[in-house]
Image: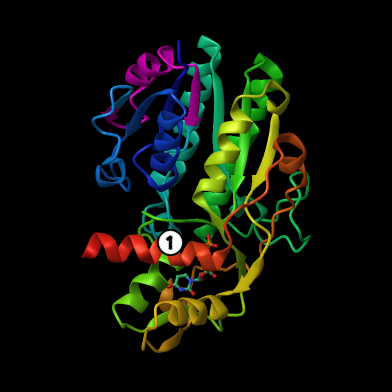
Amino acid sequence: MSSTYLITGGAGFIGSHLAESLLADGKTVQVIDDLSTGSLQNLQSVLDHPRFTLTVDTIMNRQLMADLIDRADYVCHLAAVVGTRRVLESPINTIHNIVVGTSNVLELASEKGKVVYVASTSEVYGKSRDLPFTEDGDLVLGPTNKGRWSYACSKAIDEYLALAYHWERQLPVVVGRHFNTVGPRQSARYGMVLPRFIEQALAEQPITVYGDGSQRRCFCYVDDVVWAIKRLVTRADNYGKVFNIGACDEITILDLARLVKDKARSSSKIVFVPYDVAYDDNFEDMVRRIPDLRRLQEATGYRPRTGLAEIIDRIMELQMASAA
Ligand code: UDP
């Protein structure tokens, strides 16, 4: 019989790609999503699939989660608030859902002996300058009056909890720290830079670079992330460990704006928006963020397969096809 995966947040950007890929592998997929930032649109290609079920509800519904986890072999826990903007707008909800939601998943999975993948984030490295970031390196978070850090801190608690469940209760759990994942279906609505720049360029609107654009990021294609998640969760050697998942090619945000403008053959102006206008005074950006991928490479043979120029082409092609 094919194994069953429960994907929390499966109607979201990464979750929906994971659902498609697992179904293509012959697995059975259950998704729970409250559609707060995910959408049915994301799941359009799988909604009628015979091995797919969707439950529209919150992961805070414990009884329901108990039933869903009962029926699963693997739980991929991806449900969380997305986007810096939403984190700043509703911090109580952010902290509560991340910490209590994950705690519920881990407790239920541990009672039922199920394997869990916990999606964490490169945000946990915070202001560390110890590049590239290694999984055992220090986390350097900002003060509690700067809202951005509530997300990183909550995700760090999730990681502590996951590792504690592994250590104290032998839960088979693996943590992935996602670094700036991009690809088709990522919404521009939640502030993420690449979909915003593409939308702005295609609409011939100003491309909004925050600060002076010298901050740098490494962007990773969603299919590479899905590839890594599938391999991490199915190998017992990986349980009880944390893995960076991303790509290593850095680009400044200003160069990203130029690249997108160029690829879209757009006449958009590139404009600089001060941070206090873009977010508020309560914001601190990270200057650089590069993953050390050695642990992931050694465990799975991982190599990011899709470069940024190709990623941008693919996203734009699909966007233009769906607009036509
Ligand atoms: N950014 C930008 N213009 C935008 C949106 C974001 O210059 O319209 C910048 C943002 O300040 C950050 C980088 O792009 O330095 C990546 O932002 P994103 O929210 O995509 O991810 P982060 O790396 O901050 O989690």
Q: Position of residue 8 (x, y in %)?
A: 41, 32
Given residues 241 and 15, the one toward you in this image is 15
Give the left or right position of residue 57, taking residue 121 as reference: left
Q: Position of residue 311 (x, y in %)?
A: 49, 62
Q: Is residue 285 magenta?
A: no
Q: Position of residue 133 (x, y in %)?
A: 74, 54
The image quadrant that residue 264 belongs to is: bottom left
Task: Look at the image and tell me in which quarter the C terminus lies.
Answer: bottom left
**Where is 185 relative to 267, above or below?**
above
Residue 161 visible within the image: no
Given residues 25 and 39, the one toward you in this image is 25
Q: Position of residue 137 (x, y in %)?
A: 78, 49
The image quadrant that residue 203 belongs to is: bottom left
Given residues 84 and 289, the one toward you in this image is 289
**Where is 81 relative to 19, above or below?**
below
Residue in the image at 65% along x and 14% along y: 169
Residue type, label 1: Arg
As drawn, the residue found furthest toward the left would be: 324
Label 1 sits on a secondary structure element that is helix
Q: Is residue 55 magenta?
A: yes
**Where is 127 relative to 237, above or below?**
below
Q: Residues within 10 Å of mark 1 (few under 14, many from 20)?
A: some
Q: What residue is pinned by disc 1?
A: 314
Residue in the image at 42% along x and 51% along y: 82
Given residues 56 and 182, the one toward you in this image is 182
Residue in the image at 67% along x and 28% along y: 163
Residue 1 visible within the image: yes
Point out the stretch of residues depicted in magenta.
54-76
Task: Look at the image and tell me in which quarter the N terminus lies.
Answer: top left
